[in-house]
Image (spheres, grey):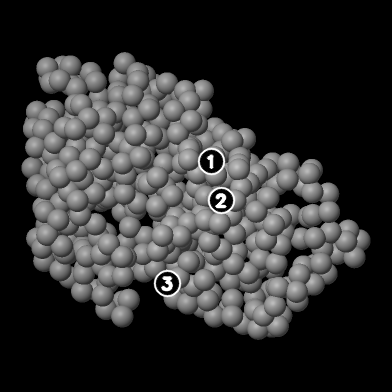
Amino acid sequence: MKKRMNRILAAVMAGAMILSMAACGGSGGSDAGDKKEQGGADSGKKILRVLNWGTAEEAQIAQDAIDRFTADHSDVEVKQTSVPVDSWSDFIQKWISMTTSGETPDVINIGLEAARMAVENDLLLPLDDIVDGDEQLSKLKEEYAESLLDGFSVDGKLYGLPNGTQTMVMYYNKKMFDDAKIAYPQDGWTWDEFLEDARKLTKEDGSVYGYGLSSSYFQLTPWWSTNDAYPTTEDYAKPALNSNGMVESVEFLNSLVKDKLTPDPISSDVYSMFASKQLAMVGAGRWVLNTWKDAGLTNDDFDCVQWPVKKKDSSVYGGAAWTISASTSEKELAIDLLKELVSDEYLKANAAGGQQVPPTSTLATDTEIMGTTPDNIQGIWKAVTIAAPVAAPTYFGDIEQGLLRGLEEVFSGAKEPKEALDEAQSQVESAIN
């Protein structure tokens, strides 16, 4: 998952947008004139700009969709800028530079981590009326998981149409369960049942751990969400790192570390360890499956189940969505391009690499797209439908870093969970204030 969004850059970006609008008179007509000029005297075409992020392969998938669009719009030229970023600050910096140079993008692929920042700075166009007034988009909306639409909505308004997602389920080694004469876990199993299984499956000589705990922000989230806890308040306005539910969750995870039921969560590559059969259970999404199959794991070796439950069935999801710039001067063309970028053809291609989970029920339950490994592959889509969004407030970078720093102190034994989370809460509050 893409990692950090720098809230200072967000503020700079908002200022850049204001300066850019002022420079062109703040009117759509002036901006349209700029775009016509940028199209070049040779072509005389209207210009649409797309800001994308990801790999070269993902950029090509978007380009294929753009080519389909331009085949039907011969008077339009679409210029795609794709940023291969590891952090949201890189992406936002590119957005700033495009805006200040008079090349403001019309259509933007935005990650969940940056969505609220963009909305709160009035950078995105609400899509509700657009979707409701279009037959294709209305049908598509019915196919989306409600959880995904909620993630790209702010104050009841929809700002993005998802193009792919990730979630978390619990994978388990079937042979290890068989050898230990333990029944395979079933959806609805509890934290206590998970803990009991992890104890039985851990070998005293250290050759096998019952569970592999990842210390990544996204991968940890199901432990909060199944305990009906969240690292922010419901309105995202404030951090809630030291709430009772968060502290209880971290205490449970710390017990796994203390009892040596998991390898060191800070330094261990738990996914490689699961592939090499050093772990009986590990949490992950679809993104690990190709690597595990390449390592020789088959349906006989492993399967997946929903996350163990403390207070509620839940998991986590992240992902990206196509959006339209609030400052676009070519709204109707931007809508037509958006429709191509969320078409079945695009969504299938985006999922074909084995990383993304398609955001619609029909595609996400299609075995030709998702494959048939493991047997319960459709449990991944079920997890999406019950999941909570990864906590991505406007101060995303602060809360991610603060929480992970606190957890490292807990797992290293330097601090108890309550003390570490109290301190993380205070640090994040200071940073955002």
The nearer-to-camera label among 1 and 3 is 1
Task: Evaluate if marks 1 and 3 touch, with contact meaning CB atoms under 8 Å apart.
Answer: no
Report the number of numbered marks: 3
Marks 1 and 3, how far apart in space? 32 Å
Q: Earlier in the sequence, mark 1 or mark 2?
A: 2
Q: Where residue 6 sits: x, y (%)? A: 43, 69
Q: Is residue 37 above or below residue 345?
A: below
Judged from the image, the secondary structure of the residue bearing numbered disc 1 is helix
| Residue on which the image places disc 3 | 7
| Residue on which the image places disc 1 | 140
Where, by quadrant of the figure, is residue 183 drawn?
Answer: top left
Badge 2 density bin: few <14, some 14–19, many ≥20, Cα 10 Å: some
Judged from the image, the secondary structure of the residue bearing numbered disc 2 is helix
278 or 106: nearer the eye?
Answer: 106
Q: Is residue 272 above or below residue 334?
A: above
Badge 3 density bin: few <14, some 14–19, many ≥20, Cα 10 Å: many
Residue 110 in view:
no
Residue at point 80% right, 72% down? 33
189 or 198: nearer the eye?
Answer: 189
Q: Earlier in the sequence, mark 1 or mark 3?
A: 3
Residue at point 15% right, 62% down? 243
